[in-house]
Amino acid sequence: MLNGFSEDFSFETNILEAGAYFNAPTTHPEALPIHMATAHNVEDLDDLQKRYDEHGFCYNRNRNPNRSALNDMMTYIEGGEDSLACSSGMAAISTAVIANTKAGDHILSDKTLYGESLEVFSKILSKYGVEYTFVDFTDFEQVKANIRPNTVLLYTETVGNPLITVPDLRKIADFAHSHNAILIVDNTFMTGALAHPLALGADVVVNSLTKFANGHSDAVCGAITSSKEMIEKCHAVQVLLGTQADPFSSWLVCRGLRTLDLRVKKQAANAAALAAALEKNPYVKKVYHPSLASHPAHELAKSQFGEYFGGMLSLELEDNREKMNKFMRALHLCHYAMTLGGYRTTMAYPPMSSHSDMTKEERMAIGISDGLLRISCGIENAEDLVKDFEQALEVAYKD
C-alpha cells in the first residue's frame, strides 16, 4: 500500500507521508508538469516487473517523464525513430561517439568544428586507442583520401563552426556507408526546423539544445536522434556515464521548442539581411553566410536547406584589438555571450572562446583569424540590427 499516512503514527512520521501522492486524477494537464522525483514507487515485485517490462519510470538516471517528452519532440523535429536527451550538447556528442567506437577504430572528422568537439577526439578518445584524422569536409577529395580500413565513423556539422562552411551531407553519407562506416552530424546551428541530416543519409544527429532549440539562453541540454537500435545502444552508455538531461532543463527545452519554427526562421532571415549589408560595408573584410552568392557552398546550401540558411554568420574585421573593442562597445543590440541561438543577437570571438585551446598557427591553418567574430542573430527588427552594426563599424573604423 503506497499511502502510509495513519492517525496512529506520530507527527514526525506522518509529516513524511501527508501529501506524498496526488489524491485526484492529474492526467492530461494543459501545460507539461515538471517531474523532479529521483524515483517512482511501486506496489510490490509484480508491479516492479511490470514497470520494467513497459519501460516505465523507476529511477531518474534511467528514465524521466520530462526527458521522455523531450525525446518525443526531438524525434519528430529531426525525423528519426527515437531520441535521447542529454545533459549538454557535449554530453550528446561524447555519448554518441563513445557508443560507436572502441580501441583500434578510426574517426574521420571535419576540421572546422566547435573546438571542444575536436577535443573529444584528440584529448579523450585518443587516450583509449581511438585514432582520428581532421580534414576539410567541404573538399570531398580530402575525405576520400583519408578513409582507412578501420574507419568506423565520420563526423561533421550541418553548418561548420565558426566559418559557416556547408559540407555535402548526401555525398558524405553515401561515401561513409560504402565503407561500412556511420555518419554523425551535429545539427545545432540549423535545427530540425531548417535542415534534416537524417533525410540526407546521416545515421545519427546530435544537437546542443542549449542553443537555437531552447532559444532562451536559460537551459543547458543536448540530444541524440537516430534509429531505435542506435538510441538503445547510446542509452546503455548514458545510463553508465550519467549524461542524462535533468527534468527542469528538459521541461525548459520542451517549452522553448514550441516556438522553434517562429524563432529560427526569423533569426535566419535576420542573418541573411545582416550578411548582405555587411558584405557591402567597407570596414568588413569578409562575411561568411550561405545566403550570400559569394559563399562557395551557396548552391549546395540551397539544395540542402531551401530558403533559410540559418541564424549564424561570421565576419572578418581588421586584426586590431583596439578597434574591435571599440566596435563591440559601440553596439547596442549585440552583446558578447559564451553561447548562441538565443532570442537576442550575440557575438563570440572564436580565438578566445570555442577555439581558445588552439595555437594561433593551428587556428590560422583552418582559417580562423584574429579578426574573426561569430554572430548569432536574434529576433530583433532586421533594419534595427543592420543600422546598429553599421553605426558601430563607423564609430570604430572610420579614420
Image (cartoon, rainbow, N blue to C red):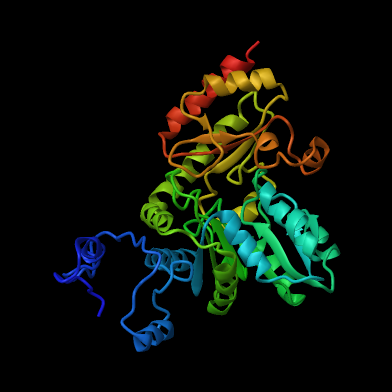
Residue 379 in view, yes or no: yes
Looking at the image, residue 107 sits to the left or right of residue 267; the answer is right
Residue at (36% x, 60% y) in the render: 36
* Residue 298, percent from left and from top: 63, 49
Classify 335 as above or below 226: above
The front one of 225 and 265 is 225
Residue at (79% x, 70% y) in the render: 103
Name of the residue lying farthest toward the bottom: 46
Classify 195 as above or below 179: above
* Residue 283, percent from left and from top: 65, 23
Name of the residue lying farthest toward the left: 7
Residue 79 in view, yes or no: no
The front one of 208 and 159 is 208
Dividing the picture into quarters, in which one does residue 251 lie? bottom left
* Residue 14, percent from left and from top: 21, 65
Quadrant, the C terminus: top right
The front one of 251 and 158 is 251
* Residue 51, percent from left and from top: 38, 82
**Total numbered labels placed on residues in the image:** 0
Name of the residue lying farthest toward the top: 399
Classify 104 as above or below 370: below
Quadrant, the N terminus: bottom left
Residue at (71% x, 75% y) in the render: 177
Residue at (55% x, 20% y) in the render: 329
Looking at the image, residue 124 sits to the left or right of residue 383; the answer is right
Looking at the image, residue 210 sits to the left or right of residue 233; the answer is left
